[in-house]
Amino acid sequence: MLDLRHLMTLDAVASEGTFGRAADLLGYTQSAVSQQIAALEKSVGGAVFDRPGGPKPVRLTSLGEVLLAHGRTLLAQAAATADAVERFKAGEGRVDIGTFQSVTNALLPAVVRQLRDDHPAADIRLFEEEVDQPRIDGLDLLFFDGRGSGDVEQIKLLDDPYVVVARRGTFPEGPVPLTALHEVAMVAQPPICDQARVERVYAEAGIAPRIVFRTADNRGVIAMVRAGLGIAVMPLLALDIHSDDILCTHPVPLAPREIWLSWQAGRTLSPLAQRVLELSREVASRF
């Protein structure tokens, strides 16, 4: 197997013309250059230089020319690989992140903005889906409103409390009890993810809201509440508003949903993914 150090020495001697000048270029002694060329010639089974002696420069043999042509390609590839590794360690490269609507709108913008500032050359790819249990395969990190399943490691980023969103005057100021939701017209998200848990809580408490419209679009829910179609019960992270001239929010006695960040167990996170994790914790701590 060819040693890259030997190829580098071959290139230096060919470029400089003498072993002495090659030694100066590489920071070696002349004897070290001679030893490396001798080792190279032994590994390829023939001379790579004609040595005329005296002050005359050495000349590549035919074997040396073939070896140098291919060797320079290998040296360039090795340099490119080393550069790629250094850029990877510095936080460049690609990171694939699974997300969902609330995190995309509320948490990730600050994370991506800081990541862009820190690593302008980073390739950040986001994949959003609203399913009961998103797949983590092929992703570096996955945000989800619940604990991940399967062979994953994970951290909880925050608790996201639920509130009632309604037109002003629909309820008195202050908290709204669950009993006040019974048979009330409600706009809701599809019964997946944490929404399914909330509706189970309703059922266990004997509460049956009259759901008049479902949409996975958080803004669509708010728009229909604003239009007077019904009230909504939503986690705070999903809201664009907390209150305005038409709408207001009320606390409601529901356990908050939990926002988790997961990655595949046993997998070493890249520096870029590790930075996303750190930034996510920092941003989540502000909510």
Image (cartoon, grey):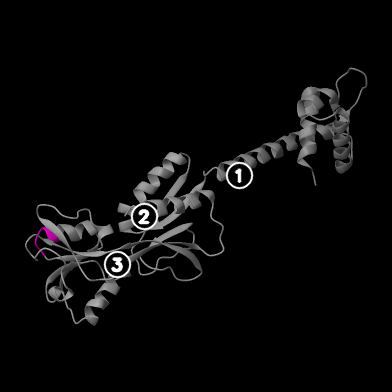
Q: Residues within 10 Å of mark 1 (few under 14, many from 20)?
A: some
Task: Give residue 211's quadrant in the image.
Answer: bottom left
Q: Which is more toward the observer, 107 or 48?
A: 107
Specify the label residue 256 is tagged with.
3
For disc 1, the marked residue is 85
- In the rendered view, does 85 fall on the left or right side of 219? right
- In the rendered view, does 280 fall on the left or right side of 27? left
Residue 187, image x and y in percent?
17, 66
Helix, strand or loop for disc 1: helix
Helix, strand or loop for disc 3: loop
Indicate the amino acid at tag 1.
Val
Residue 17, image x and y in percent?
81, 22
Using the numbered discs, state the Cα–Cα distance from disc 2 to disc 1 in whole angstroms.
Answer: 31 Å
Q: Which is more toward the observer, 203 or 129?
A: 203
- Does residue 18 appear in this view? no
Indicate the amino acid at tag 2.
Ala
Using the numbered discs, state the Cα–Cα distance from disc 3 to disc 1 in whole angstroms.
Answer: 42 Å
- The residue lying furthest to the left in this view is 169
Q: Main secondary structure of the magenta part?
A: loop
Looking at the rendering, the stretch of residues picked out in magenta corresponds to 225-229
Give yes or no for residue 134 being in the magenta stretch: no
For disc 2, the marked residue is 284
The residue depicted at 46 percent of the width and 40 percent of the height is 118
Evaluate if marks 3 and 2 touch, with contact meaning CB atoms under 8 Å apart: no
Q: Which is more toward the observer, 106 or 78?
A: 106
Indicate the amino acid at tag 3.
Pro
Specify the label residue 201 is tagged with.
none
